[in-house]
Amino acid sequence: MSKKKSESKKLKKYAVRYQKSTIMVPYPRNPRRGVCKVCGRSKKKGEIKTTQLHHWFYAYDTKTVKKNPLLALENTIEVCYRCHKIADWLRDATTGTRPEHIQWIMDTAKQMPDWMQRRFTRICQLWLEEIKKK
């Protein structure tokens, strides 16, 4: 047995959801620290009850991750429930849509009530201003 494998067997294992599976990840500490990476709210301060690991995308199939559980931590951030819902929406809008189907998002947005279109337009404007700062 390799040194790396024997070391990982000594580590405590933490449950991480990966797609629809729970993967037990050997790690030196809990991968969740209890603070939302987006809004900064904390479990310790009583601002939130829990955090979750959000996967921006799933780079591997579940079989591969089960063989190498540390892969379950890739492409993740720790978020509260509220921010997780937003992150899921952003992931779905950007990775769940083929580039040739982006027009569907635009066509659907045109069907929103005017007040929703104004909010969506404001979100898009603020995002463009934010990335110009980089």
Image (cartoon, rainbow, N blue to C red):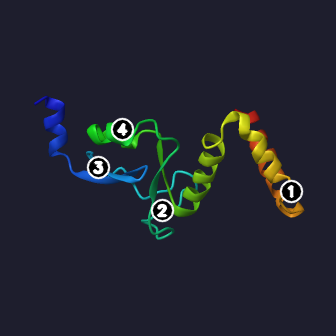
Residue 54 in the image, given as x and y percentages of width and height: 49, 50
Using a 10 Å C-alpha cutoff, classify the residue at mark 2 as few (fewer than 14 neighbours), some (14 to 19) or many (20 or more). some
Please indicate whether residue 45 sits to the left or right of residue 16 in the image: right
Q: Which corner quadrant holds the C terminus?
A: top right
Q: Which residue is mark 2?
A: 42
Q: Which corner quadrant holds the N terminus?
A: top left
* Front residue of 117 and 97: 97
Callout in the foreground (1, 3): 1
Q: Of label 2 and label 1, which has the lower sequence position?
A: 2
Judging from the image, what secondary structure is the residue with disc 3 in? Answer: loop
The label on residue 29 is 3
Callout in the foreground (2, 1): 1
Residue at 86 percent of width and 53 percent of height = 110
Task: Tell me the kind of residue under disc 1.
Answer: Arg
Q: Which residue is mark 1?
A: 118
Q: Are marks 2 and 1 in contact (CB under 8 Å)?
A: no
Q: Of label 2 and label 4, which has the lower sequence position?
A: 2
Task: Tell me the kind of residue under disc 3.
Answer: Arg
Distance of label 3 from label 2 (alpha carbons): 18 Å
Please indicate whether residue 62 sits to the left or right of residue 27 in the image: right
Using a 10 Å C-alpha cutoff, classify the residue at mark 4 as few (fewer than 14 neighbours), some (14 to 19) or many (20 or more). some
* Front residue of 5 and 78: 5
Q: Of label 3 and label 2, which has the lower sequence position?
A: 3
